[in-house]
Image (cartoon, grey):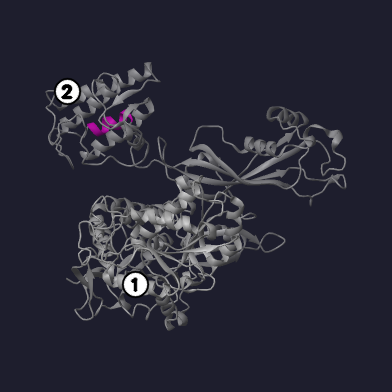
Amino acid sequence: MILESYINGQWVTGDNNNTRNMYDAITGEIIGLSSTEGLDIASALQYGRDHGKALRDMTFQQRGNMIKKLALYLNKRKEQFYEISYKTGATRVDSWIDIEGGFGNLFANASLRKLFPDQSYAVEGDPIDLSRGGRFMAHHILVPKKGVAVHINAFNFPVWGMLEKCAVNWMAGMPAVVLPAPQTAFLTEAVVREIINSGILPPGALQLLSGLTTSILDTVASQDVVTFTGSAHTGRLLKAHPRLLEESVPFTMEADSLNAAVLGPDAVPGTPEFSIFIKEVRKEITVKCGQKCTAIRRIIVPENLMEDVQIALGKQLDRTVIGDPKLKEVRMGSLINTDQRDTIKAQVEKISKTAAIVYGSFDPVEAIGADGEKGAFMRPILMREDQPFKNTQVHEVEAFGPVSTLMPYNGVEEAIELAQMGKGSLVSSVVTADNAFAKAYTVEAASHHGRILTLNSESAPQSTGHGSPLPLLVHGGPGRAGGGEEMGGLRGIKHYMQRCAVQGSPTSLTEITGIYQPNGAYTEAEKHPFAYHYEDIKPGMSLQTHKRTLTDTDIQNFANLTWDHFYAHTDITSLDGSIFQKRTAHGYFIISAAAGLFVYPNKGPVSANYGLEDIRFLRPLYHNDTIYVRLTCKEKRERDVSGREHPSGIVKWYVEVFDAEPVDYENGKTDEEATALVAVATILTMVEKKQTTFVEMTEGKIKACLSKLTKDSKPNWGMMTAQHMVEHLEFSYRVAGNQLQDFDIATPEKYIDKVAATLWNYEKMPHDYEMPLMKKGTVEDLRHADLETAITKFWEAKEVFKDFYKKNPKAQTKNPVFGYLTKYEWYLQERKHLNHHFEQFGLL
């Protein structure tokens, strides 16, 4: 069977020519073939470019929600991927890193949508004033590249390796073409097949080439991005491809590196740090059978602790049970195939020309539950190089498996030098309780590393470990490690976007960036800005307030209220030699007084103060100075709502506080050129969104809907008759009105808050939901003689509900699904519930 590829919107199979075998790593059996022969690779890349507009046009919020939806979809199907992953030689723990670690990257990158505006491109950095008059300025924007991201991946992480890259390019608005390593392409293909089946991604967002191809770079173009994960040798060959040079295509390489772990001189046997170090090194040797680009290859320890570390590591490695990764007692599975074992053996032979093997060998393995000869099993190997400055093979040769080499150092300078002899690494660890040693090592070694982990007894219990790249941290390294950079949160997304400096007037740049720029034109609001819902607020919408005079009494009262008795506010006899002329208003009093001027007192869409940022005081205000405020919408940001609150977004307001009568105090007179602007700040408010999903269920509206209902009315879904529906609504009102409470809440207690919170959102009830108190798969027996009687009883029950809460406004009554609800929550339930059933019978 030849593994299928997914290109140009369809699943296709390569020719039988030039196929490669894919093996079950445990049994050695052939499980399939991979081939891309005969496939039109150039058309696949062009297909991605041609269909990329769908992704580019999506806002960051839409892309993030799409990725989150995909992560949830895949996570529900993870067990089928675990079953396939065993064939790669991976244990459950190994596969967890690959499979759920990959899904974790989707979740993490999806959450970054909160840091972007609700538009398809981003604004970077602060505005730059290019003129004295403030009418010519610049800002940087980031737009999605109009190409495809070509990902050439390694065999060791067939799921994580794909998703950690795709999550980032999708967030940026760029489609991907994935070329997995053929050894484990069958697992990548299984995940891609589910992604395509989900229908969550737009067409062209993901394509898969299941097999080797030498032509994938032949037609890349200037708007494309190429990433590579694998050996440094292969990476250098790809990096020199003429097409990359001709088109100036960005190329990011993440190569295997000789990562080092350093034991601090304080971490002697018996200390927590010594135990932490031994366990961390053992884990990095055995997890994924050592086939990790971040695995520890060089173990750098104080010379006087060499024997202790060697003995302790040997004891830890003795506990490694090797065999069928499906078995619970197995701690280390196999390599990807026997060819990899032969490659490792050749590399170990190179290192062992000067270094001794002090633990392990290449003798046949007695594998638990498997054939040690047919499977790609090998023992962990610990080597020892006593002269690491003289014998450099250990710093140049990597055995990509469960192999690591012990070496001594004397003093932090030697530890740093040894680490740097790897000529660039993805990660290094330093285990010590001595923070001075950790600082000295980290600062000097950082130039040669992409990440450094400092471990001690304080951080170890919550540490993610030496070998775990994290979505929000950069993954990559200088020199041998490839000189590239992946992930890193916002940094990673920017790799797939084009940065462009935009110049113009503040008003023009407000329109272009979607962010109000200082000195831009205001749009005077027709009513108070706080009276608008989130959707109706636009950057530049503005309000100028009335005036307020800051009196001497105001200042002293504020000092007494806050206990802020700084001399400039309270002791006018101490002003000589200071920058202040008279009794000075507190900076925070100015902001508080400004808030008093611009805040809208009535209840409205603004539900909360969400924060304060970028506050600056430009010059002092004194007693009897008069101020006014200009409040302008600066920017809007989406937010995820959790808990019992209505959907809302964050609005950033640019607050300018002006002196109504600016005075040039040096000349002692009013001066039109004196600075009127005295303070600026950005305040954040949480603003509710419009509710447009549901019709408000007034009594008049309910009567109008029920007047359309007849005994012959048919539902658009479900089994209810018209009378069943009305009796069901009557029952709901009697529950809400405390007449019927003799039942158990069906929703488990640990989920009740999450379920009850759905009443607050603006999403419709699902069509296929079955109420817990109703018979499953059928309808209840009718309680009333006919539809007219049922409607009469419906109105009686509604009155019971209204009367109960009129008398008991603070009461909570029990709902079988949502738990105990307040009067307001019953109103939300009523609105959703009536809309649901009235739509069911076509009454709305």
User: Which residue is found at the position 18% from the left and 68% from the top?
Assistant: 29
| Residue 639: percent from left, percent from top | 45, 46
Q: Which mark is residue 789?
A: 2
| Residue 203: percent from left, percent from top | 30, 64
- On-image quarter of the C terminus: top left
Is residue 458 magenta-colored? no
Residue range corresponding to the magenta coloring:
698-706
Circle 2 or circle 1, nearest the eye: 1
Residue 143's place in the image compared with 454, above or below, is below
The answer to whether residue 181 is left or right of residue 767 is: right
* Residue, disc 1: 345
The answer to whether residue 698 is left or right of residue 531 is: left
Crowding near the residue tagged with mark 1, few <14, some 14–19, many ≥20 C-alpha atoms within 10 Å = some
| Residue 317: percent from left, percent from top | 36, 56
Q: CA distance from mark 2 to mark 1?
A: 86 Å
Secondary structure beneath dot 1 equals helix
Pick whichever, 182 or 759, lies toward us.
182
Secondary structure beneath dot 2 equals helix
User: In this orientation, does residue 209 appear?
Assistant: no
Sequence order check: which comes first, mark 2 or mark 1? 1
| Residue 567: percent from left, percent from top | 79, 35
